[in-house]
Amino acid sequence: MPGAPEMDKAETLAWLRRISGDLATATIQRLEDTLPWYADMPPARRSAVGLVAQAGISSFIQWYDDPTSTPWIAADIFAAAPRELLRSVSLQQTLQLIRVTVGVTEERVAGKGASIRDAILLYSRDVAFAAADVYARAAEARGLWDARLEALVVDSILTGEADEELPSRIAALGWHGHGEVSVLVGTTPPQFDVDQLRRTARKLGVDVLIGVQGSRLVLVIGRADTSQRDDIEVDLAFLEIAKRLEPGFGAGHLVLGPAVPALVDASQSARAALAGFAVARAWRHAPRPVEADDLLPERALAGDPLAKITLVERIYRPLQTHSADLVLTLWSYLDNGRSLEATARELFVHPNTVRYRLKRVSEVIGWDATGAREALILQTALILGSVGSEATRRRAPARRSAH
């Protein structure tokens, strides 16, 4: 009877179409009974998941009728649900949905023959692959969108053109940083492994925003919430964090901007880091990484207004406010080649007095004039402070007329 198999399949198809409604109802009930996440969903999303299950049953019947339709029907299953369902239902949950639907269908077709049971297993495999493909494409699209958004946020920070939308964009990126933030600027390596850099940052307990601008690589670093983790070092200084991240950068200088209170203030740190990166080659023995504030003299000479203000506000004015003797002693010490004896002779004091005053200078401003590099920073600050003071400007005409 060559026509019998055809008749059996036709009868099976007719039977499947008759029970499709009951299968959908039984599947929804099984979902509510066995999957807590489904029962906890809002009604609209629960209804959308139900539509996917019903579409799966209907498409199976169509596939059983014509197996060559697999690529189209499997993709159409997920087209039945709204796009936001992909963001609320994970791939794991989707596979659970497929498993429940297949289980209910298998129970109903038990005893109808091995051919239909095998068909269900084959089709469920195709649907599972289709689901994985849908989620993979969604993840790829999300990754591209995240990369563009991250580049936009980093660019806004670097240019200082932040607007009221910056916090929402940062939130959309899933930023986990809190508290202080610092910006690290270096060169992009020939083979840049962004995933490895992010993994290193996570191990250090920080979150990062990464911007690649040609040969320049920029990291915005913020400490993440590590209260639930015991596998990382906490409260590392930003300079130490930069040292750990240093292998992810290319050859050349690496400059760390000063810490700022929050991510929305990161443009201040970025300006300092970029200015330092532009002049870092002027310091022959600059460490890697180097703090932008250690490059204040070079930045000031290059015309960086932020560096000039920082030198005057953090060195010259505190010393001037504290004691005129400290300013005079520091001037004399630097002008005399950092010689205690020559400074003491010029000021008519004992060398120990000079030594004591220099110690007080270090206590007031945090820089030690006895070191060659810090002496350059202090001398630059004194020059800028004196040039900008009202007293200097008033004395200038008198000195010119004396000559």
Image (cartoon, rainbow, N blue to C red):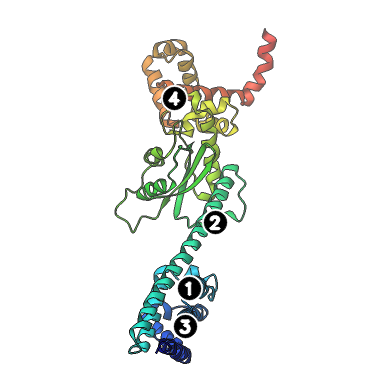
On the question of residue 33 being in view, the answer is: no
Q: Quadrant of residue 229?
A: bottom left
Badge 3 element: helix
User: Where does label 4 land, which residue?
Assistant: 374
Q: Amino acid at mark 4?
A: Glu
Q: Amino acid at mark 3?
A: Ile
Q: Residue at x 38, y 22 (%)?
A: 356
Q: Position of residue 222 (x, y in %)?
A: 45, 48
Q: Contact (CB < 8 A) between labels 1 and 2?
A: no
On the question of residue 51 being in view, the answer is: yes
- Near mark 3 (Cα within 10 A), the count class, few <14, some 14-19 or many ≥20, is some
User: Where does label 2 land, which residue?
Assistant: 145
- Earlier in the chain: of badge 2 and badge 3, it is 3
- Near mark 4 (Cα within 10 A), the count class, few <14, some 14-19 or many ≥20, is some
- Earlier in the chain: of badge 3 and badge 4, it is 3
Q: Position of residue 87 (x, y in %)?
A: 49, 67
User: Where does label 1 land, which residue?
Assistant: 70
Badge 4 element: helix
- Work out how far the residue at label 2 is from the one at label 4, CA to CA, in angstroms: 46 Å
Badge 1 element: helix
- Near mark 1 (Cα within 10 A), the count class, few <14, some 14-19 or many ≥20, is some
Identify whether 12 is placed above or below 275. Answer: below
Number of the label disc, if any, that sits on residue 43: none
Identify whether 262 is placed above or below 390. Answer: below
Badge 2 element: helix
Q: Position of residue 120 (x, y in %)?
A: 39, 79
